[in-house]
Image: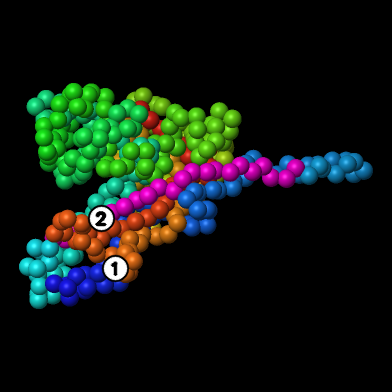
Amino acid sequence: MAVNLTNADKALKNYYLDAIKEQLEKGVNPFYSMIRKSETDVYGKDVKKIVTLGVNGGIGAGAEDGDLPDAGGNLYQELTLPLKNLYGTVEISDKAVRAAAGDTGRFVNLLSAEMEGLLKSAKYNFGRMLFGDGTGQLATIKSITTGLITVDSARYLEENMIVDFFDMLGDPFTENIRRKITFVDKANNTFRVDGATLTESQVPPDSMVGVQGASNNELTGLKALFGDSDTLYGLSRSKNSWLKPYEKTVEGTLTELDIQTALDDIEERCGVAPDLIICSLGVRRALQKMFAAQSVRMDSMELAGGYKAMSYNGIPVVADRFCEAGTMYLLNTADFTLCQLCDWQWLEGEDGTVLHQIPGKPVYSATLVKYAELLCERPCGQGRITGITEV
């Protein structure tokens, strides 16, 4: 068994880690593949980014014998936000390790299966966080009847997901945290969890469901960028108009004029047209229907990471399962950076091992960690169209 654990530890560090990094770099979604990843703007536990606003004021014109322009210099602002702690834990039971003793192939299959499950979950949650607001909220509870929990939407809930229940302020109900989802009915927006039956007296309506430990600890995604809060990256939106992205509501059928108007307005505001359009699956179908009615065939193109996309005037259009219904984002991906202290790494013990026995349990675990945050240095260069009737 000791040999197997030693081999597993080496495999996790020398083989699986590189594979995980590559898969998470290219396999989350097209948006994640296009944004840059950098350690440059990380200072201690925070991200600090100096950005320039407007134009240099030292440009001017004048008479042949007139005064030269005054030096204007650049206008700077500092964006500040704390790094988020992202984890992924894999477990292997002692029984499984002993059962595979002496059988290298069987042990490799066991380890590979666990790592594939961790990787799949990491892709899912990373992709979801890019569209979130950082709160970790997955759904809002409407009612609980004999353990059957009804929520506003179960689209982000999955079997075997471990969740917390917390109040509207984001504080968890301590006696009900760390419940595992055992059943999800997405058509009826209901689910069940393991353990003792929950009641509305324990978790009242309007409480929230979130990923374990993630309350206000997730990446600052697109929902936060387009959110209602006056504060973004430590600055006031009301005092800094460039922190406000473009918004347009159509409340009905999407037209090509709606898209082009949004693209033009964004370019007029910041000088650069968006290079990526992301929409919900239903909006993509509406877009296809619109062009089909005009007998126009949308071209296809290939993006970084091997993704395929439709093309609108040379701009890739991709659909994402986590994009809100009836919504289309128009983004300048060059403005986004995943600021990170380091890439994914294993948490290592004092002896340099990554696989450790959980105290008091016949189980060995290893934990992946990444300290990072998503930053958009030019919010005014991003846009969103909402209220689109889906097909």
Are there few (<14), some (14-19), or many (20+) residues within 10 Å of tag 2? some
Mark 1 residue element: loop
Instruction: Say which of marks 1 and 2 sits in front.
Output: 1
Residue 183 drawn at (x, y percent): 12, 39
Q: Residue at x 20, y 61 (%)?
A: 357
Question: Quick one: label 1 or label 2, which is nearer the N terminus?
Answer: 2
Q: Amino acid at mark 1?
A: Thr
Q: Horizontally, is 253 left or right of 202 in the view?
A: right
- Crowding at dot 1, Cα within 10 Å, few <14 / some 14-19 / many 20+, comes out as some
Whether residue 273 can be seen here: no
Residue situated in front as seen by the camera: 376 or 291: 376
Q: Which mark is residue 368?
A: none
- Determine which residue is flagged by label 1: 353
Q: Secondary structure at mark 2?
A: strand
Residue 56 seen in render: yes
Q: Main secondary structure of the magenta part?
A: strand
Image height of 173 relative to 36, above or below: above
Query: Residue 195 versus residue 13: which sits nearer the camera?
Result: 195
Which residue in the structure is indicated by mark 2? 89
Range of residues picked out in magenta:
72-93
Residue at horizontal 58 percent and vertical 33 percent from the top: 240
